[in-house]
Amino acid sequence: MARVRLGRERPSVGQTQTKGKLNLVERWFRNLTDKAMRRGVFPSVLSLIEAIEAYPAARNDAPRPFVWTATVGDIVAKLDRARQRVESTQPGCTLPRRRKTAKVVTV
């Protein structure tokens, strides 16, 4: 007897990592914006397109691997601080912060 699946199919392993992939894509476009577009002056759209196309070519000429700078101890300490802060939060204390009002000086 044939089995019929209802609804969407189960995602494969390659499809479950979309959040991480999106973060990498967002980081790449942020670098493109910061390093190629904001630093330049473009008198025409054509010069902007040339700058955008030159960025990946220049980046691929001298690739650099990502180097993780945080140690395991730093990460664990940060997680401990976050857990302590969450555990110390009391119900009802999550009200939005109020802006400080300026003091009125009378002369």
Image (cartoon, rainbow, N blue to C red):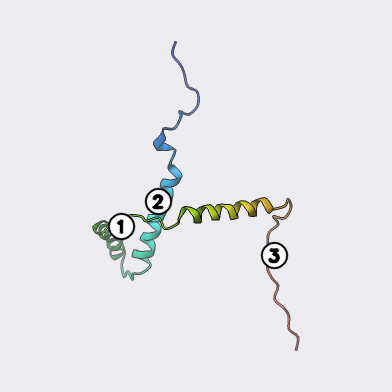
Give amino acid for label 1.
Answer: Arg
- Relative side of 99 to 31, left or right: right
* Residue type at numbered disc 2: Leu
Query: Could you tell me if the residues under marks 1 and 2 are in contact, i.e. CB atoms within 8 Å?
Result: no
Q: At x 45% / y 55%, what residue is drawn? A: 71
- Rendered residue at 33%/64% (across/down): 36
State the residue in front, 75 or 23.
75
State the image coordinates of residue 8 (x, y, percent, origin top left): 48, 29
**For mark 1, what is the residue?**
64
Question: Label 3 belongs to which residue?
Answer: 98
In the orientation shown, which residue stands out farthest toward the bottom?
107
Q: Earlier in the sequence, mark 3 or mark 2?
A: 2
Q: Residue at x 54, y 55 (%)?
A: 77
Find numbered disc 3 in the image and state the secondary structure of the residue it sits on. Answer: loop
User: Which quadrant of the figure contains the N terminus?
Assistant: top left
Choose mark 1 or mark 2, whichever is in front: 1
Closer to the observer: label 3 or label 1? 1
From mark 3 to mark 1, how far is it between C-alphas?
44 Å
How many residues crowd mark 3 within 10 Å: few (<14), some (14–19), many (20+)? few
- 59 to the left or right of 29: left
**Occupied quadrant, residue 17:** top left
